[in-house]
Amino acid sequence: SASESNSAMPHSGTMPHMSATTGRADEVVAGAIFRDGRLLLAQRIGPPELAGLWELPGGKAEPGESAEAALRRELREELGVEVAGAQRVGVGVPLDGGRVLRAYRVELLSGEPRPLEHAALCWVDADELEQIDLVPNDRLWLPELRAHLGR
Ligand code: 523
């Protein structure tokens, strides 16, 4: 296989979170959709420790899938919308299991977001973003999200 023949990345076969094609840790992608000075947040249903908290919607990229493709797929599944682009926002967050969580600004092309896999959705302005209970990882992106909202 490609991974066995490439000595620069010999371990991807035994490290399921590593991409055999890029040698980078697989991602969990999270999408920041802005509209009319507001940011879309989604309320998690689970697991219990995250249920009720708000996040940038997204999920695990598939092996070999680009961040932009993963965002298109995940936001179609979770919100029923079409998005494009992938502009990094804030720090990457190492997760248990070796993946890295990264946020990206995406542009809403079509569809009105619906909570197909979340408890609810909301659009927050800069003041509301400060008040809402975000999942702990997503709080790390507050400075950049605030800046995108003009604060
Ligand atoms: N986060 C997170 N913030 C955030 C997302 C989209 C994900 O902290 N905005 C974390 C939560 C989980 C991990 O990343 O620890 C995977 O996210 P999840 O559960 O939304 O991804 P899925 O839906 O692809 O995962 P499975 O249900 O396991 O397939």
Image (tube, rainbow, N blue to C red):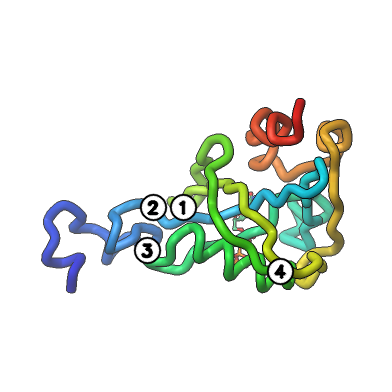
Do callouts 2 and 1 mark residues in contact (Cβ within 8 Å)?
Answer: yes
Q: Nearer the viewer, residue 93 or 88?
A: 88
| Residue where numbered disc 3 is placed | 16
Residue at 28% over, 62% down: 21
| Residue where numbered disc 4 is placed | 81
Q: In the drawing, what numbered circle is on residue 145?
A: none
Picture mark count: 4
Q: Amino acid at mark 2?
A: Ala
Please, what secondary structure does the residue beneath circle 4 have? loop
Q: How far apart are the alpha carbons under marks 4 and 1? A: 25 Å
Q: How far apart are the alpha carbons under marks 3 and 4? A: 30 Å
Q: Say which label, 4 or 2, has the lower sequence index.
A: 2
Q: Say which label, 4 or 1, has the lower sequence index.
A: 4
| Residue where numbered disc 2 is placed | 25
Q: Amino acid at mark 4?
A: Val
Q: Say which label, 2 or 1, has the lower sequence index.
A: 2
Q: How far apart are the alpha carbons under marks 3 and 1? A: 9 Å
| Residue where numbered disc 1 is placed | 99
Q: Quadrant of ligand 1?
A: bottom right
Task: Judge the density around disc 1: few (<14), some (14-19), many (≥20) Cα neighbours within 10 Å.
Answer: some
Quadrant the N terminus occupies = bottom left
Residue at 69% over, 35% down: 148
Q: How far apart are the alpha carbons under marks 4 and 2? A: 27 Å
3 or 4: mark nearer the eye = 4
Q: Say which label, 3 or 4, has the lower sequence index.
A: 3
Residue at 39% over, 52% down: 25
Cβ(mark 3) to ligand 1 < 8 Å? Answer: no
Q: Say which label, 3 or 1, has the lower sequence index.
A: 3
